[in-house]
Image (cartoon, rainbow, N blue to C red):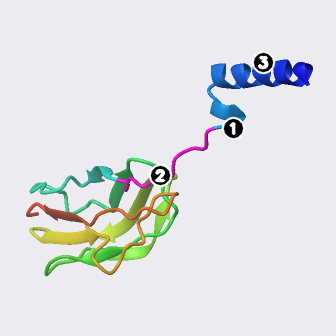
Amino acid sequence: MKRFAKVFTVLAATAILLGCPNGVSDQEEADTTPPTVVSLSPAHLDETVSPATTKLVVTFSEPMYGGYSICTAGNTFPALIGAPVWTSDTTIEWTVSLNADTIYSLSLNAANYTNFKDAAGNALDPVYWAFITAAE
């Protein structure tokens, strides 16, 4: 029995030194932090957007699961051409058609629409996005 006690003591000490208290490995804590928007193109509240702009681009702070919710957030919503495309696990873009001298507004997610989620399933808090195109 003394031999097993020595072996157990050595194993327990090794586990503690390696960061495994009681010989059990730590499990990663669950991700409960929602993603954030790192950048918007055109920029939020930009008043000089070219009406020739054909892409709306959003980059997130972490990998997303691949869904999306864009909602109307005012009187003018950009005319979307086709479905949005995830160009990476953190960036999505939409092809659009914009008019000159127009205020555009939209929301990424909303109270009842939360498909922008990170890989762990945390929903993006709603993000309001507005910009104005220049006069031609």
Task: Please tell me whether residue 115 is drawn above or below residue 65 in the rendered image.
Answer: below
Residue 103 position by quadrant: bottom left
| Sequence order check, earlier mark of 2 and 1 | 1
Q: Nearest to the eye among marks 3 and 2: give it.
A: 3
| Sequence order check, earlier mark of 1 and 3 | 3
Measure the C-alpha gap from mark 3 to mark 2: 34 Å
The local crowd at label 2, few if under 14, some if 14 to 19, many if 20 or more residues have their Cα within 10 Å, is few
Disc 1 marks which amino acid? Val
Of the 4 image quadrants, the one containing the N terminus is: top right
User: In this view of the protein, which residue sits in the foreground, 23 or 41?
Assistant: 23
Disc 2 marks which amino acid? Asp
Q: Nearest to the eye among marks 2 and 1: give it.
A: 1
Local SS, label 2: loop
Task: Please tell me whether residue 11 is drawn above or below residue 37 in the rendered image.
Answer: above
Q: Which residue is mark 1?
A: 24
Measure the C-alpha gap from mark 2 to mark 1: 21 Å
Local SS, label 3: helix
Question: Which stretch appears magenta?
Answer: 26-35
User: In this view of the protein, which residue sits in the foreground, 50 or 103?
Assistant: 103
Res. 10 mark: 3
Tell me which secondary structure the magenta stretch mostly adopts: loop
Q: Residue at x 26, y 67 (%)?
A: 126
